Image: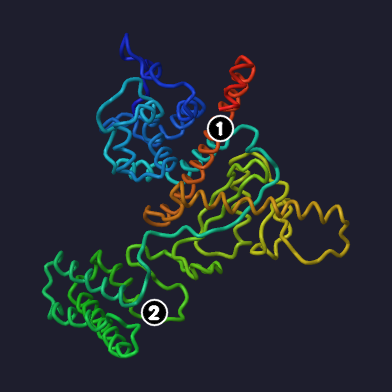
Amino acid sequence: MYTKPSPHTQQSLFFDLAGTLDGNHPLFVLAGRIGWGVFEDAFGKLYSPGFGRPCKPIRLMAGLLILKHLRNLSDESVVGQWEENCYYQHFCGNAQFVPAAPCDASELVRFRDRIGEAGMELILKESIRVNGEDGGEPDVVIDTTVQEKNITFPTDPKLHRKIIAKCRKIAEAEGIEVRQSYARTLKRLALDQRFRGHPRNWKKARKADRKVKTIAGRLVRELGRKLPAGSHWNADLALFKRVLAQKRGDSKKVYSLHEPEVQCIAKGKEARKYEFGNKVSIARTKTTGVIVGALSFRNPYDGDTLDAALAQHERLTGARAETVTGDRGYRGRKEVGGTRIQIPDSGRKGRSDRETRRLRRDFRCRAAIEPSIGHLKSDHRLGRNFLRGVAGDAVNVLLAAAAFNFRRFMNLWERRLSLFVRILLRYFTPPAACHHAYAA
């Protein structure tokens, strides 16, 4: 049940949380710049008008999601730190300090599912608005990267052993007695599978791999015979059969049983030849550095992501981008919906020196998106995605981009405040004091 926020924020006559905090703290200033009413109006429609348990305040839940990616925390950590941090509580709309957890960590999962990708895009749009005119630049640079999923490095023996473990759980849940548990056999085969890099152990390990695959196939077929026709486990058995049938050179392979949509992406990196996750398109203003587009894909060609990326940029900023500068991964695209696409090429035929210098300057500006992607991965949880499914991929990248923009605003505020303090000290400090300060 949705409950409207109370207009009375002060609960005590003698104490106010906002009055005890530093009004120049970046998080305090950011809390005053965000239009929380936009979230109240948009997300309040997703709740039942008068039935069920009253919901948590929308500002609280939206604020926790922003803080989670702003500080690179897990759901459990952000809930625990909220209980200890006065600035977190003020950011989420509290007028009094509350020495208790605001909600259970699982409620953040349900709130993400409730507002979905459209709600996360609204948060990203608000983060662009907070940065003012910097987000309205008509020239955009774009690049793609990989958002890795939280899975182990996939190998066929690992998948076959997981199939065996899941088949045992299904049999136990349904009360099915299998002909053989293979517990002792699998323990012996696990010893044979070790140290496969040694020349003497290679054949023994390969033979053990084939035996484990055979055992997995036997259990899957036995469950298929003994389960009823309309069992809800049939979808899992179909996935197991697909894994057992796939070969090394097949396309659209399954790399994880709990995340079957994971893609194997090769970006040509020296350190990581293959990455397992999904492709992400990031659009950034050319000179100001505001992220104005963040979209999740599976594994398409980079040029095929331009239509959706430019459409999202227009939704978020209200204007169509004039030029988009990308790398050679976007070759084959010169114009998309009236937007000019610039990529490096070796040809100068028919091009003036002035045009050549302008293109070189634009391509140097394009390289600035690489450190932005690095900060998204290291500071805002884009490096490894812990959210489940295709919807989790889209939600994680949008929240990471929004946190990047909010962090940019906070950094600008700190720099401007520091500059203002230095100017005040310069003009209001006696000359003798300045001389002694410089001498020290």
Return the residue found at the far top. 13
Q: Are marks 2 and 1 in contact (CB under 8 Å)?
A: no
Residue 160: which numbered mark, if any?
A: none
Number of marks: 2
Q: Quadrant of residue 208?
A: bottom left
Identity of the residue drawn at 61% across and 51% down: 369
Mark 2 and mark 1 lie on one chain; the one further toward the N terminus is 1
Q: Is mark 1 on a helix, strand or loop?
A: helix
- List x then y, in percent, for residue 62: 41, 35
Q: Which amino acid does label 2 sit on?
A: Gln
At label 2, counting other C-alpha atoms closer than 10 Å, the crowd grade (few under 14, some 14-19, many 20 or more) is: some
At label 1, counting other C-alpha atoms closer than 10 Å, the crowd grade (few under 14, some 14-19, many 20 or more) is: some
The Cα–Cα distance between marks 2 and 1, rounded to whole angstroms, is 49 Å
Point out the image quarter for the C terminus.
top right
Find disc 2 in the rendering and name its residue: 246
Identity of the residue drawn at 20% across and 75% down: 223
Q: Nearer the viewer, residue 167 or 285?
A: 285
- List x then y, in percent, for residue 108: 34, 41
- List x then y, in percent, for residue 381: 43, 49
Residue 175 shown left or right of residue 280 in the figure: left
Residue 215 shown left or right of residue 333 in the figure: left
Decide: is 326 above or below 292.
below
Find disc 1 in the rendering and name its residue: 130
- List x then y, in percent, for residue 325: 69, 54
Q: What element carries label 2?
A: loop
Decide: is 82 above or below 258.
above
